[in-house]
Amino acid sequence: MPKEEKITMEKAVDRYADMVYRLALSQMKNTTDADDLFQEVFVRLVSHIQDLESWEHVKAWLIRVTINCAKKHFGQYWNKNVDYIEEPERIADLNGGYQLPEEHPVRDAVGKLPPKYRLVIHLYYFEELTVAEIARLTEQKETTVKSQMHRAREMLKELLEEEHSL
Amino acid sequence: MEQGRIDQYKKETSQIHAPEDLIRRTKEAVRGEEERIAREKAPQKTAAKKKRYGGRAYRWALPAAAAVLVIVAGTSGIFFGRGADKFMSESALDMTANDTSADDTSAESNMELQLGVSSGADADGAEPIGRGGSNGMTEDAEIYDAADAEMPEAAGAEMSNAVAEDAAVAKMPDTATEDAAVAKMPDTAVKEAATAEMSDAIAEDTADTGISEAAAEDTVDAGISEAATEDAADAEMSDTATDNTAAAVNGAYNSIAETGPDTAAADAVQSDDIYSSLKELADTVYRLLVQTIR
């Protein structure tokens, strides 16, 4: 069995930057909050990285902390009552970064779902986690996750049909 | 969700990448956080060192010294107590062994005395009986004194039973001769005189071989008395008298043997008292030391 690469903060940021950013963006729906969440998560990792034994542990820790930080963000009064306007131009100006695709109908439809449904859809279909893993990371019962998945699919189907009909 | 939609969702999401600028800034923030944590830990280490070497160094030394002192005191107390115990027990054992061997000597002297009486009666009649008896007793006393001196003290106690048994067995064949000799005795007065001499000889033997007062009392209690001797004489040195004498001697031996454990038990109680008092003293010293340290 090959020896696993030593876990350092530099390598952790390089390895899981995209994963954390996608999850943060899917939860926050705007790049500003996603950026803040991204930094907060990795800064928190500094004081916990010595307790994590493998990269899988690091990945699970990052997903869980990103979800919790997002929940905490939406739990604040200000954030509950303010809606952000996406700024695609700003995002497109970032050199060497990413650009949102011009056409992203499914992603937009997912973005319209409530946060808890967005989360399970993202973790299940993009991160390819199992229902049990999602339940463990979100600290919910598996049946609850399955129920959320079912509801999310139904809502997504309706949204996509609406968009298609348009 | 349809597979096509799933693939499309994956494709759309996988086009999202964390901005390079954000990654760079995040790495800087991470480094800053690492430095901050390192700075926080460093003063703690320095403070811990100062705390350890700033007047509280070797804080463990005094309690350790006190503990060692207590242990040494306790250990020496135990050794002393056990040593005294052992010494006293050995003394008691020696006394018991001496008494036992002396008792055995007297018992066997008694038996030999009876044999001497019977042989004397056989050979010369009434007059030589007394002489034969006394000569036999004297010789027996000398022999058993020598044997007692040669016998190791510890072995003496163990051997006493065997010696007594051997003597009893050796006596058995002579019983018939003895009975016959007694039957031939013409004069009861002569017989009584011989019995009186025998009693005196027994008393002398007992004194010579060093039977203690307790042993003597036990022997008396167990039946070696003048009355018993007279009864034995009245019964014309019958087997019954001989058996009574042997039983009395055995009783005396047993009573003496029983005094050993009693003495040892008394010694143990005494040593326990010494040990407990030493332990209390050590505890008090330890408590005082701890209070002083605090």
Image (cartoon, coloured by chain):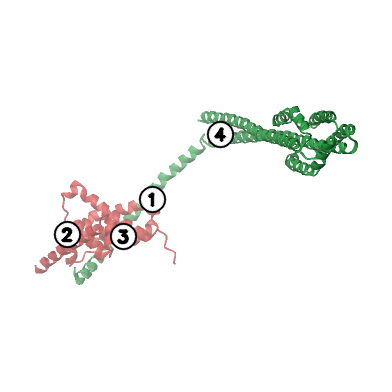
Judging from the image, mark 4 belongs to the subunit labelled B
Q: Amino acid at mark 4?
A: Leu
Q: Circle 3 is placed at which residue position?
A: A17
Mark 4 burial class by Cα count in 10 Å: few <14, some 14-19, many 20+: some
Q: Which mark is residue B133?
A: none
- Compute the Cα span from label 4 to label 3: 57 Å
Task: Give chain B's shade.
Answer: green
Q: How many marks?
A: 4
Which residue in the structure is indicated by mark 4? B62
Chain A: its colour in the image is red
The residue labelled by disc 1 is: B34
Kindly identify the amino acid type of the residue bearing the numbered disc 3. Answer: Ala
Whether residue B69 is situated above or below residue A89 in the rendered picture: above
Whole-percent x, y for residue B161 in the image: 73, 41
Image: B148 above or below A137: above
Q: CA distance from mark 3 to mark 1?
A: 18 Å
Residue under disc 2 on the same chain as residue under disc 3: yes
